[in-house]
Image: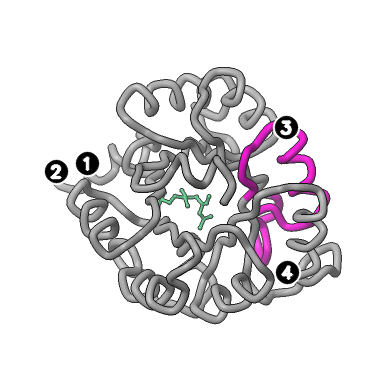
């Protein structure tokens, strides 16, 4: 197993992302956010965009899961082989890509994309939106599978918290593949629960690194 995957075992990966037009959308800001997360105990960082990946790799020594979001509809998380290669060139240790069966902009299948990346020594994480996505990802030999897209592709309900059901199904069906839980882990208790369920690691974004959302959660109680 690849070292970067071993290093995140049992731990918390913090996703540091700011969305287009937001005040914190700056590579140096995201690198500072990543450093702060590592100080707090993050064993890995997930981040978006080539500049952020490079800036964060320059500041932290934990494994970095890189993505490149491009577009808003359909496949937008590292949508093509070119996007994935660029994330690797920017320094990401693991590249997460959309693992749905939806058409990809470059016309390649998910499996073709993974095989090409593996030929180049790239470690691939599958952002799944359903159990069928996870099956396809495992079939293609993907290094890590994750619940990232559950609730965002129309195939799974958008649960308030993490998708425990999908996580459980993935862990049970693929005991030899590292399964990450990502998406809507909003409390330390939920993190504890997903790790107890057998997740290899968990990724938390919004609840740690997105102050606008966190402020809204508080403001909604006024
Ligand atoms: C669906 C999608 O595009 N998810 C993105 C993937 O990188 C991010 O917007 C999420 O913040 C990330 O998955 C972490 O999840 P949460 O922020 O819920 O802890």
Q: Residues within 10 Å of mark 2 (few under 14, many from 20)?
A: few
The quarter of the picture where residue 48 lies is: top right
Answer with mark 4 or mark 3, whichever residue precedes in sequence.
3
Q: Position of residue 145 (x, y in %)?
A: 52, 63
Would you say 45 lies left or right of 184 here?
A: right
Label 1: few (<14), some (14–19) or many (≥20) C-alpha neighbours in 10 Å: few
Q: Nearer the viewer, residue 1 or 95?
A: 1
Q: Is residue 217 left or right of residue 113?
A: left
Q: Nearer the viewer, mark 2 or mark 3?
A: 3
| Residue that carries the numbered disc 4 in the rendered image | 110
The label number, if any, that marks residue 90 in the structure image: 3
Q: Which residue is mark 1?
A: 219
Q: Is residue 217 above or below residue 26?
A: below
What residue range appears in magenta? 70-95
**Badge 4 vs badge 3, beta-carbon distance below 8 Å:** no
Q: Is residue 56 above or below residue 201?
A: above
Does label 2 or label 3 sit earlier along the sequence? Answer: 3
């Amino acid at each position: 197993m690849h070292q970067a995957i071993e290093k995140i075992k049992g731990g918390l990966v913090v996703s540091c992302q700011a969305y287009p037009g937001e005040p914190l959308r700056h590579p140096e800001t995201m690198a500072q956010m990543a450093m702060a997360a590592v100080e707090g105990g993050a064993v890995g960082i997930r981040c978006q965009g080539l500049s952020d990946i490079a800036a964060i790799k320059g500041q932290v020594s934990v494994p970095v899961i890189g993505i490149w979001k491009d577009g808003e509809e359909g496949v937008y998380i590292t949508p093509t082989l070119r996007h994935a290669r660029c994330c690797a060139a920017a320094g990401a240790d693991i590249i997460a890509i959309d693992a749905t069966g939806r058409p990809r902009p470059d016309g390649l299948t998910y499996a073709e994309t993974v095989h090409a990346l593996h030929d180049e020594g790239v470690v691939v994480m599958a952002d799944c939106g359903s159990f069928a996505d996870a099956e396809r990802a495992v079939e293609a030999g993907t290094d890590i599978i994750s619940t990232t897209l559950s609730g965002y592709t129309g195939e799974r309900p958008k649960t308030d918290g993490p998708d425990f059901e999908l996580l459980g199904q993935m862990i049970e069906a693929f005991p030899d593949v590292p399964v990450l839980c990502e998406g809507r882990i909003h409390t330390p208790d939920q993190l504890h629960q997903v790790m107890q369920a057998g997740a290899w690691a968990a990724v938390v974004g919004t609840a740690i690194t997105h102050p606008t959302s966190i402020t809204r959660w508080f403001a909604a109680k006024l």
